[in-house]
Every structure is written in C-alpha cells, then in structure tokens.
Image (cartoon, rainbow, N blue to C red):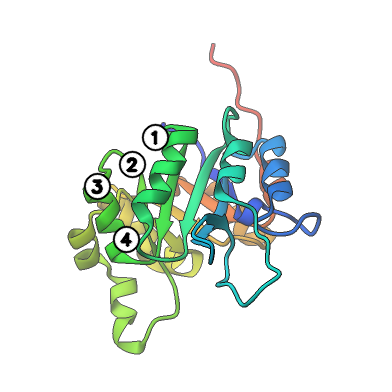
Amino acid sequence: MADHDRPLISAHRGGPEGIHRPNSVAAIQAAVRLGVDLVEFDVRRAPDGSFVVGHDAFRGRGEHPPSLRAALEVIAGSRTRAHVDLKETGDEVAIARLCEHHLGSDGFFLTTLEDESVRVLRTAMPHLSVALSLGRVPPLRSVLAELFPGGRIARCSPTMLAVNHHLARAGLLRWAHQRGLRVLAWTVNTPRLIQWAHDEPRLWAFTTDRPRYALALRKPVAPHA
C-alpha cells in the first residue's frame, strides 16, 4: 500500500447511501464508479461452501448474497482497492488467496476482529496487509485488551489497526501512531466526524456510509512547481 497525503476513504459495505442494498454488487459498482480509494465489504462462507458477500449469518432459505468472486471482478482493473472484512474464522487463507488471484497482493487488504485470524494470515501469507479490528463491545474483563492492545498486537503481528472511531479519538490513534502502526477508523458517518477524519493526519483511512460527502470535502491538490 502506497503512502499518501490524506486519509483514504473506504465505502462501508459499498457505501450504498440509500440507493443500493448494502454489500450488493450494485453498491460496489457504484463505489468504484464514484472513485473511492477503498470499498469495504463483508465475507463469509455460504451453506453451499462458497464464499459470499454478506454481514450477517444465514438464517434460512431464500437468501442469495453475491459471490465474493463477483465482487472482486467488479473491482479488478479499477483504481479502487478492496477492503475485505472477514466475518468468520477458518477460511482466512482461502479467502485471501482468492482475493490475491483477482486483485494482486496490493489490490486489497483484510480486516478481522479475531486475533487468531490475523496470526493465521500473517504466518501463511506474510506479504499481505492485515488489520486487527478493535472496538466491538467485549465482556468487561476484555475492555482493557481493546483500549490497550499492545499484548495482542505482539502475539498476532497485524500490519495495521482498524479502530472504532470512539477508541481512535479516545487516544488509541495517538498510541498507534507513536508505534508506527497505520490506523483505519470505522464507521465515520456524521458531518462532524467525517470532517475530523478528513483533517486527521495520523489516520491512514476511514470507513464511511457516506463516501460522496467524504469525497466532496477533498480539495484539489495543487500541482508541483
């Protein structure tokens, strides 16, 4: 992943903005046409064994989420990179290999809440970018592990962190920056928060349901003399 002068914008679940169904091929296509830097979508295994784009577990028959392959084919060849959020454990390497086949190693990165998933990926495919996600509502005994994740990071070796914006603004962004860890903040939706993320030089990227609004805040970069 190349260096940049401003935080990258990731369209959360395709950034449907009320027009398309979240995590749909149509939403991902719209995000690519919009020109976002990154497009985020969730991946899990379907009952038939295939990999699909979907946030929630399957509840019964009649569900037909798009295939992971279809989502990757939409992104392939564009300037937009895939932000692949793993919703389950056990298939990390298989999913990563499929993504790499379609997009190359620099065309995507993975995020996961599970330390073990990070460890598995970093061991099997150390050349990939893998983020440990922080900010889910944990049991009380695990709160400190979310706020002060040094031990977890040492054990699973993520290349970056994906951090709930509340934690980021509470000091975790400063903590990570001091240790040279890139940070993606999620999910940044209000105008005030999007402005904060846009202006925060320590952020590598942020995820939002409002990519059009976020992109509109960007000022044209003056050409070099």
Quadrant location, the N terminus: top left
User: Which of the two discs, 3 and 4, labels the residue nearer the N terminus?
Assistant: 4
**In which quadrant will I find the C terminus?**
top right
Q: CA distance from mark 2 to mark 4?
A: 13 Å
Of circles 2 and 3, the one toward us is 3
Check disc 2 and report the residue beneath it.
128
| Mark 3–mark 4 distance (CA, rounded to whole Å) | 11 Å
The answer to which quarter of the image holds residue 139 is bottom left
Q: Amino acid at mark 4?
A: Ser
Q: Please report whichever mark, 3 or 1, sits nearer to the chain's N-terminal start.
A: 1
| Amino acid type shown at disc 1 | Ser
State how many labels appear.
4
Find disc 3 in the rendering and name its residue.
124
Depth order, front residue of 78/210: 78
Labelled pair 2, 1 in contact (Cβ < 8 Å): yes
Q: Are marks 1 and 4 in contact (CB under 8 Å)?
A: no
Front in this rendered view, residue 55 or 13: 55
Q: Secondary structure at mark 4?
A: helix
Occupied quadrant, residue 62: bottom right
Numbered disc in front, either 3 or 1: 3
Q: Amino acid at mark 2?
A: Leu
Residue 206: x and y, percent?
53, 52
**Mark closest to the chain's N terminus, 1 or 4:** 1
Q: Which mark is residue 137?
A: none
Instruction: Pick whichever of labels 2 and 1 is earlier in the sequence.
Output: 1
Q: Does residue 202 show up?
A: no
Q: Residue at x 34, y 72 (%)?
A: 146
Q: Which residue is mark 1?
A: 105
